Image (cartoon, rainbow, N blue to C red):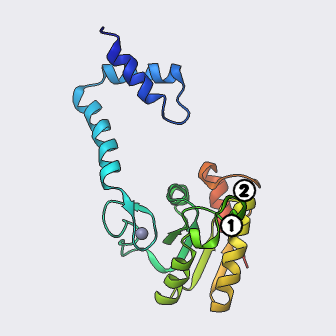
Amino acid sequence: MSQGIIDNLVAELTRLPGIGRKSAQRLAFFILSMPANEAKSIADAIIRVKENARFCSNCYNITDSDSCAICTDSSRDKTSICVVEEPSNIIAVERTKIFKGLYHVLLGALSPLDGITPDKLRIDELIQRIKRDGIKEVILATNPNTKGEMTARYITELIKPLGIEISRIAYGLPIGSDIEFADEVTLSKALEGRRTL
Ligand SMILES: [Zn+2]
């Protein structure tokens, strides 16, 4: 049955978030019309990310080697850390082109009711980095929602005794939102207008 392979591709594509049956059909027929090498490079990229992606041993960004591209970039300010919840948040902050330091990914946000206690996040690792690497400034860019705020407050209490500069992005970001979906202008303002804690 010749329709089978297209149906199969449509079914696979509908697994992706935000892709309903109609979008999946459009994508499937688009892929069908693509040059074979282009379609193959999409498939290869998916396989490569699943086989090689791991967390950076320093900041927990996604990488395919021990340290990520940001941690190994000698032009970045190694005394400043921007703390985010997820690796995808780094892409959002990078788009603003304002922050030139390093990142630290917590891999989540505090949510005690869901069992996400501080030991489940990369908070200890953050404190160790601050002490070990002579960090002078920490910017808390956790999401402006309840969990993100709770996480920022918890980390602030831990960092304060270390006597370094701590700030929290706030200005311009709608409460209850996710920085991943903030547009560049809004997130730029939030970074520039960060307040010292
Ligand atoms: Zn890294």
- Image vertical order of residue 142 relative to residue 27, above or below: below
The residue located at (74%, 62%) in the rendering is: 171
Q: How dense is the environment of label 1, judged by Cα within 10 Å: few (below 14), some, or many (20 and up)? A: many
> Mark on residue 100?
none
Q: Which residue is mark 2?
A: 173
Q: Residue furthest top?
A: 1
- Image vertical order of residue 3 relative to residue 17, above or below: above
The residue located at (57%, 75%) in the rendering is: 123
- Camera-side residue of 96 and 105: 105
Q: In the rendering, at what x and y percent does residue 155 appear?
A: 66, 77
Q: In the rendering, at what x and y percent does residue 19 appear?
A: 52, 29
The image quarter in which residue 37 lies: top left
- Camera-side residue of 125 and 74: 125
Relative horizontal placement of residue 180, taking residue 129 as reference (left or right): right
- Locate the C terminus by quadrant: bottom right
Q: Which residue is mark 1?
A: 169
Relative horizontal placement of residue 125, taking residue 57 as reference (left or right): right
The residue located at (44%, 24%) in the rendering is: 11
Q: Does the rendering let one see residue 169?
A: yes
Q: Does the rendering let one see residue 100?
A: no
Q: Regarding ligand 1, which quadrant of the image does it lie in?
A: bottom left
- Locate the N terminus by quadrant: top left
State if disc 2 and disc 1 touch (CB < 8 Å). Answer: yes
- Camera-side residue of 98 and 129: 129
Q: Secondary structure at mark 2?
A: loop
